């Protein structure tokens, strides 16, 4: 424990380190999606339960949009507080179109099927376009935020929870699926 605290004190996260890590994880994620390839494969159900990669990408988009909006609020001096009641959660979801992922009432890593359902009739290209815009907004906001703002709001940790940690989870599921269809075809 002491060695961990020593490391944290002596190796503080900075914006350049975080941006580099985020971009590296993003590159790995995009390379995997490119490896999957065709639109047909991206929309096939069964990658993770009854979900397609498109459905999973909707989850990524919603999480990125969540943190992009929180970063924007910080830039504009607005205050965010996680929802602490189910009524507040419902209001938040209706207002923003995605859940309050930082509410203690939600399981952090669990997908929200309402978000997936809301986007089921939206084309893959539109989902990708919206997701890329949300990711770009995150990068732009981090450029504008000061290091003190990032640290005061625990943004390195919070942004990781809504960007590259979900990329890793989704990548794991996609790789598992790819390996299973490769074995089936032999």
Image (tube, rainbow, N blue to C red):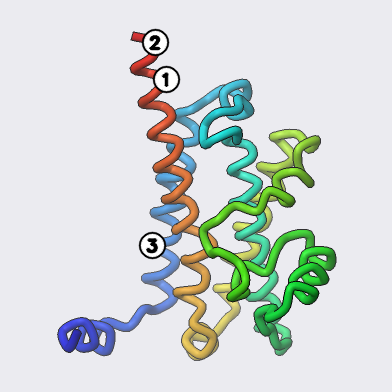
Real-space CA distance between mark 1 and mark 3, rounded to the nearest whole angstrom? 31 Å
User: Mark 1–mark 3 contact, CB under 8 Å?
Assistant: no
Q: How crowded is mark 2: few (under 14 residues within 10 Å), some or many (20 or more)?
A: few
**Earlier-in-chain disc, 1 versus 3:** 3
Element class at badge 2 = helix
Real-space CA distance between mark 2 and mark 1, rounded to the nearest whole angstrom? 6 Å
The percent coordinates of residue 75 (x first, y second) are: 67, 82
The residue sitting at 74% across, 51% down in the picture is 114
Q: Mark 2 points at which residue?
A: 185
The image quadrant of residue 8 is bottom left
The percent coordinates of residue 126 (x first, y second) are: 74, 40
The residue sitting at 66% across, 75% down in the picture is 70
Element class at badge 3 = helix
Q: Name the residue under label 3.
A: 21
Q: Residue furthest left?
A: 3
User: Mark 2–mark 1 contact, CB under 8 Å?
Assistant: yes
The percent coordinates of residue 160 (x first, y second) are: 47, 66
Residue 35 or 82: which is nearer the viewer?
Answer: 82
Position of residue 88 relative to residue 131, above or below, is: below
């Amino acid at each position: 424990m002491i060695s961990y605290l020593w490391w944290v004190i002596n190796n503080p996260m900075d914006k350049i380190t975080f941006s580099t890590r985020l971009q590296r994880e993003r590159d790995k994620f995009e390379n995997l999606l490119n490896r999957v390839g065709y639109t047909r494969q991206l929309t096939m159900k069964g990658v993770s339960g009854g979900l397609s990669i498109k459905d999973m990408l909707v989850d990524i988009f919603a999480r990125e949009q969540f943190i992009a909006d929180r970063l924007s609020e910080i830039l504009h001096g607005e205050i965010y507080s996680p929802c602490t009641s189910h009524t507040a959660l419902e209001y938040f979801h209706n207002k923003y179109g995605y859940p309050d992922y930082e509410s203690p009432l939600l399981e952090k890593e669990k997908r929200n099927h309402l978000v997936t359902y809301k986007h089921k009739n939206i084309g893959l290209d539109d989902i990708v376009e919206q997701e890329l815009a949300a990711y770009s907004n995150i990068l732009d906001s981090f450029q504008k935020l000061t290091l003190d703002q990032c640290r005061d709001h625990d943004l390195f940790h919070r942004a990781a929870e809504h960007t590259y940690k979900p990329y890793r989870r989704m990548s794991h599921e996609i790789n598992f699926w790819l390996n299973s269809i490769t074995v089936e075809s032999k």
